[in-house]
Amino acid sequence: MRKFKKITTVLLIATFVFLLGCNSTKTILKTNINFSNNTVVAHRGAWRKLNLPQNSIASLKQAIKLNCTGSEFDVRMTADGILIINHDPHYNNLEIEKTNYSKLAAFKLSNGEKLPTLKEYLLAGIENNATTRLVCEIKPSKISKERGQLIAMKIVQLVEKLKAKDLVVYISFDYDILKKIRELVPTASTQYLENNKSPIQLKEDGISGLDYHYTAYQNHVEWIESAKKNGITLNAWTINNVADMDWLLANNFDFITTDEPELLLETEVKRATTYNDYNLVWSDEFEYSGLPDSTKWNYDIGGHGWGNNEKQFYLKNSLENSYVKDGKLHITALKKDYEDLHYTSTRLTTYERFLTQYGKIEVMAKLPEGKGTWPAIWMLPETLRTKEEEWPLSGEIDIMEHVGKDPNVVHTSLHTELYNFWKKNQYTHFETLPDVFSGFHLYGIEWSSESIKFYIDNNLFYEATKGENGKDTTNEGWPFEKPYYLILNLAIGGNWGGDIDDTIFPSEMLIDYVRIYHQTTFNN
Ligand code: MG
């Protein structure tokens, strides 16, 4: 009987505490959190398009409305210990850490909104929101390291009190602040901002993510792979143009922090349809300087005309003929005597480095102008290099060829034993583009066991299908079911290149990046 009474009392107290807990949060709190399935973290909220103040509640609400997976904001503490949302250490020329909140709050934000406290901001952020992370940047204190730790502690207490815990991600440039957070809430999501620690170091210290300036990843490409391997989340800031967004999306970043959330959402949707289940397996973004990366590229060397009576001599490790600078690979042809030829150039290949059978292969390139130039982006099979097969039985995939005597006409072809240019019956197509010399275009193929689709800027313009129009489906008609390597070169003259205008040199093809993807559903 006494035991029963004791249980009843415990139950009553438990119920009371439970009800108290429910009443203490008036805000409509969603418990079934299901974060938006995109990478978009709105930097200081979604403010730019609607001309809202950064770090305002209005910009936070807009980020939630857009379904961003996160909305970032900056937290500082006033002289009288109030946590407020503001990026700069000053607000209306008043130093936040040395000014009381009431004095600061006398100044409204540009949209008439009151300078938000963290409490107001979090309450707005948890209301009807189960999709957008609240990405809380804790600004270190200029007064002392200890004050920074105190700020971190107060933020954690408030987040716990408001039951916002599951929505909040903590980020900071101050590593000790993140370590403090981790000590207080071992399960908290934390991301470090300062670019100076490897994923392994973060893992050892229990920090769950990287959130570095995007150039840090270009300088340490290996961190991307290492983070994925070690379960460290990847975020980058602050990405406001499509090219950089594309690069991070191609590398499957978990988060991308941007001032342009609408643009990133749109870019992501477009990409999802084009790259649906493709995974990046090999790439060179050319974010270094000097010779092409020798772990990725090999050279074809020589001046024997390459079967086409070409006039250039291809050199190896020649900095004036192939070099990476300002994010681009330069393949440069020069009017320069070498042995008995009068032009030098480069033919880079991935053999002995990377072979692929099937996949999506894409090269962002700008072509050289002038008579005699013959740039090409193409593929040959390993069986040809090892001399198991001869050309054209081996096969050849020409993703892009252009000859200067026929400006703006981009050719694409497949050569096989039965269908090739000697017989004038190869699979082939050409497309006229207005600005191949002034602008970069994405030349690419999607290669499967059944077909090869040719794209320019992700627009399909030609498809060759195995067995189309009664064509032979054996190796003699369709030799595209074996590993190939990629070739990038700039030939001069020759049977197709034709007469050479000697005033055009140096002449160069620029490559912004090369990316090779495999289909996740196809085991290649
Ligand atoms: Mg920030």
Image: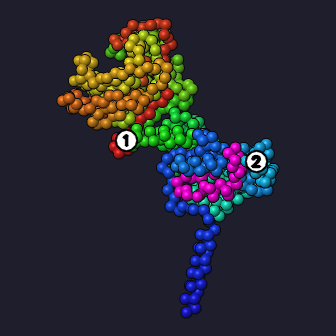
Q: Where does residue 352 sit, x and y in percent of width and height?
A: 40, 31
Q: Which of 473 and 220 is in front in this view?
A: 473
Q: Is 97 located above or below residue 518 in the figure?
A: below
Identify residue for label 1.
519
- State the scheme by which the image is colored: rainbow
Numbered disc 1: secondary structure: strand
Going by the numbered disc 1, the residue's amino acid type is: Gln
Q: Is residue 223 visible?
A: no
At a point 67% along the width and 61% down the height, the residue shown is 158
Q: Where does residue 504 sit, x and y in percent of width and height?
A: 48, 10
Is residue 339 one of those drawn in magenta? Answer: no
Q: Can residue 393 be seen in this view?
A: yes
Going by the numbered disc 2, the residue's amino acid type is: Phe
| Image position of 462 (left or right of 90) | left
Measure the alpha-carbon separation of dots 1 and 2.
Answer: 55 Å
Task: Sort mark 1 into few (<14), some (14-19) or many (20+) by Cα contacts within 10 Å.
Answer: some
Q: Residue 364 carries which label?
A: none
**Residue lying farthest front?**
112
Q: Do the residues labelled 1 and 2 touch (CB within 8 Å)?
A: no
